[in-house]
Image: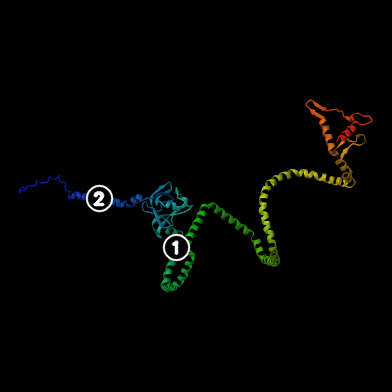
Amino acid sequence: MSTTSRRRSPAKRGPRRPRLTTLQLGRIFVAVAAVSGALLFQKAQLAAMLRPGDSVQIQFTEAHRLRSSVSDVKMSGIEIGVVRSVEDEDGMTTVEVKVDEDARKAMGTAPSARVRPTTLLGGNYYVEIVPGGRRGEFTGTIPVERTELPVELDGVASAFASDARQGVRSSTKALDATLEADGTRALRDLMESAPGTLRSVDEVLRALQGTSPESDLSALVDGGENASTVLSSENARLGETVEDLATTAKVLESRRNDIAEAARTMPSSLDETATLLDSLDGVLTSLEDTADPARPSVQELARLLDHADPVLARARPVVRDLRGVLRDARPLVTALIPISRDLDATIDNLEGPVLDRINGPVLDQLTSPWHGTGEYAGGGADRPLYKETGYMFANLTQANMTDQNGSMISFMPGTGPGSLAGLPISLEQLLNSIVDGDR
């Protein structure tokens, strides 16, 4: 290597940036300060605009010192949002508030709202939302009917007469004088005796917590909420109930004399009731003695009723249909009443020889077979006489026929061994003898 050192060429530099002058730095500082100040002045508006949540509109009769992006929105003492805008239109103030996303579900279906002061003397005001209605997410606008404004202390004082206000001032002065005299010592005595009293109060409060302090209070609150929800959703029925109670009170007032008379005679009635109960004592004793033997019968009766249920169920349609039958049969039964009286007399006349003759020779003759005698010996059949008589009338009915051409009588003549008369021997009897001889 050569020992000759080489000189390095200087590196190329870019164009230099102009440095900010003091005046320019001052201008930038003033601009940044102005922007920062403007942002600080608009901090509340920006925070309200950028705050996440849902918008709810509330109607009031007036704004009552509510300020946009400043006044808070609370529910049950917890801050849940901020007033976003206040607009007056046609004598109605519409306040738009921005609440947390889960606040709508906690409001209920019919919440109410009111403007409350942060202190007793007023000052700042906030919007308090009171849950109401049924459980569910609130949608829509809270109407003016469910909103209210605070009553200022000066408004309460102005409602009293000047003498009353002067009396309050005098009472305050007298209270100051009392405390300067013996009132201070009395207060000290009260504070000395307070610990023992507070111990008893502590025991009472512990007892009010219930047997399960972890759940009893929440259950009580839930029950109160459910009761208030039902009462608020049934305002019309609640009004009707109050009116009914008023009517009941009027009736009781009009019958106060009767109630007083009943109260006056109640002691004697109670004495008679006691006497009756003493008399029933023996009856109940006898009934107790009878109950044990009757228990098996009652058990069997229970089984009978169990089996009778399906029978009664099936018989129900029949009984229902029988109502119409009985209704239609009523005129027939009414007409049969005089007939039954006449039949009674007729049956009385038939008793004795008439029934004896019918039951005797008449029925015997009708039920016995008929065979000819004399010249008609061998005729007839083994069938009873009433059957032969029936066959005869049936044949006569068939002999008389009627069709579209009119009526006609059938006549079918025939001959047989008995048709020849006047012979010394009957041909029919001769044939019967021959047939019997062959057998």
Residue 152 position in % (x across, y down): 42, 57
Residue 115 position in % (x across, y down): 42, 54
> What residue type is disc 1 on?
Arg
Q: What element carries label 2?
A: helix
The circle drawn on residue 127 is: none
Q: Nearer the viewer, mark 1 or mark 2?
A: 2
Residue 86 position in % (x across, y down): 39, 49
The circle drawn on residue 165 is: 1
Q: Can you say which quadrant of the picture contains the C terminus?
A: top right
The circle drawn on residue 32 is: 2
Quadrant in the picture for residue 383: top right
Quadrant in the picture for residue 303: bottom right
Question: Which one is in front, 345 or 80?
Answer: 345
Residue pictured at 26% horizontal, 50% vertical:
34
Is 257 on the left-hand or right-hand side of 186? right
Question: Which one is in front, 152 or 225?
Answer: 225
> What residue type is disc 2 on?
Val
